[in-house]
Image (cartoon, coloured by chain):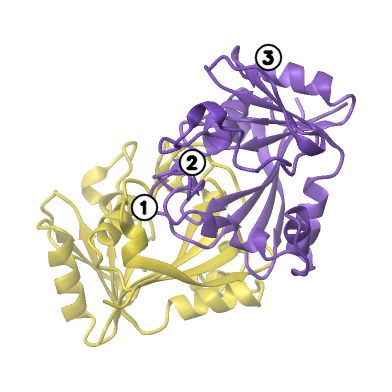
Chain colours: A yellow, B purple
Amino acid sequence: MPKLVVRSFAISLDGFSAAPGQSQEEPFGKNGLRLMGWAFATKHMKTLFGGTGGAEGMDNDFLVKSDENIGASIMGRHMFGPPPDAKDKASWKGWWGENPPYHHPVFVLTHEKKAPLPMEGGTRFTFVNDGIESALKQALFAAKGKDVRLAGGAATVRQYLKAGLIDELHLVQVPLLFGQGERIFEDLRGVESLYECVEFTPSKVVSHLQIVRKAR
Amino acid sequence: MPKLVVRSFAISLDGFSAAPGQSQEEPFGKNGLRLMGWAFATKHMKTLFGGTGGAEGMDNDFLVKSDENIGASIMGRHMFGPPPDAKDKASWKGWWGENPPYHHPVFVLTHEKKAPLPMEGGTRFTFVNDGIESALKQALFAAKGKDVRLAGGAATVRQYLKAGLIDELHLVQVPLLFGQGERIFEDLRGVESLYECVEFTPSKVVSHLQIVRKAR
């Protein structure tokens, strides 16, 4: 059965996935991009964005595995953008340029009605207005038997987690303090009876945690 | 200079230090004591409570170090008790029996006026009614040049952290989901400019994190 998975999703030591103050310059909020430092250092990420070099090893292996067998993605409105300070909101096509690193259908949860955006390299953004279950249904159909990856952000992951719709959640805990921002684990009373952490794999710089839905 | 330190303080993967539903049977809340499983497995903890055996290694080393050079402790009202369901609240002497594993002066933050409780083995509980700074001052005096350990719980650690009074904070992240409970990192906007994580040392079962106050 195809699954809904969250992979390589970074959270700070105090539980935040983004800092406040998202802007066109700072998609992870003010000084928030450092949450991804462990990932940007890897060979996989450098290659993905057209560069060379980068570290191999455990973090790289996790990132490579994160992209495997994914047929479609889902993301929330803030992860797609535009940020509040974008100059030309109407022509906004996401944060990732003309050739986004998805290369498959991406479903964006939003209240805005918008025509689909076909991009270079196989990414196609479709805007879903009728809720998380509809987005999942559309994404599973588009994935043609492969898994669907829930890309983020925190509020969207939280919604799917609360609904018990996520099959596997791979979190990356980064030893940084944010002080404020958006959490996955907020207002999730009962999550402990639906999900459990089954794997704890620390690298030299972060902790990889595998959380799965318990068997019913 | 003597320091105020927090050591071997466990938090769940989703950021909680205790589960709701504290009772005489369950001081860490309903099913909450599993947060301390990593510690109870060690030689140091077994010895502390009069047992034998237990694991050596990194987690044990951290626990041994946690008790070094400590001249006094501070704790919050819930950490001392009594819990709501205690039968004889007036005769309550803490969770630790007649010979508590502190063996030094312990200052309990509470609104209740209560005479000091001298216990066997050198532990003496003193009840402080006039706030966290007063408790710290009294504990530093009683520690006679040694450090003061802030034992917990979460709400008390949070208060001292917010006031910038903690010098070193050693957290132990345990890969368990609690879903709800009490957090250290709640309502701590600005903590990121006062404190930073300077060490990340994973063992096989938990992550040890060292957080220190930044130089001013």
Q: Nearer the viewer, mark 2 or mark 1?
A: 2
Query: Is residue A155 toward the left or the right of residue A101 in the image?
Result: left
Which residue is nearer to you in this view: A149 or B106?
B106
Are there few (<14), some (14-19), or many (20+) residues within 10 Å of tag 3? some
Disc 1 marks a residue whose amino acid type is Ala
Front residue of B11/B93: it is: B93
Q: Are marks 2 and 1 on the same chain?
A: no
Q: Is residue A97 left or right of residue A205?
A: left
Q: Which mark is residue A154?
A: 1
Question: Would you say residue B46 is visible in this rendering?
Answer: yes
Chain letter behind tag 2 = B
Q: Residue at x 49, y 58 (%)?
A: A10
Are marks 3 and 1 in one subunit?
A: no
User: Is any atom of residue A98 visible in this view?
Assistant: no
Badge 1 sits on which subunit?
A
- SS for callout 1: helix
Image x and y of residue B40, in percent: 66, 61
Q: Which residue is mark 3?
A: B134
Residue that badge 2 annotates: B183
Residue B34 pos. (x, y %): 53, 60
Chain letter of disc 3 in the image: B
Q: Is residue B191 above or below residue B183?
A: above
**Type of amino acid under label 2:** Arg
Q: Are dots 2 and 1 in contact, CB under 8 Å?
A: no
- Crowding around mark 1 (Cα neighbors within 10 Å: few <14, some 14 to 19, many 20+) is many
Give x and y (percent) for residue A133.
Answer: 15, 65
Quadrant in which residue A37 is drawn: bottom right
**Under tag 3, what secondary structure?**
helix
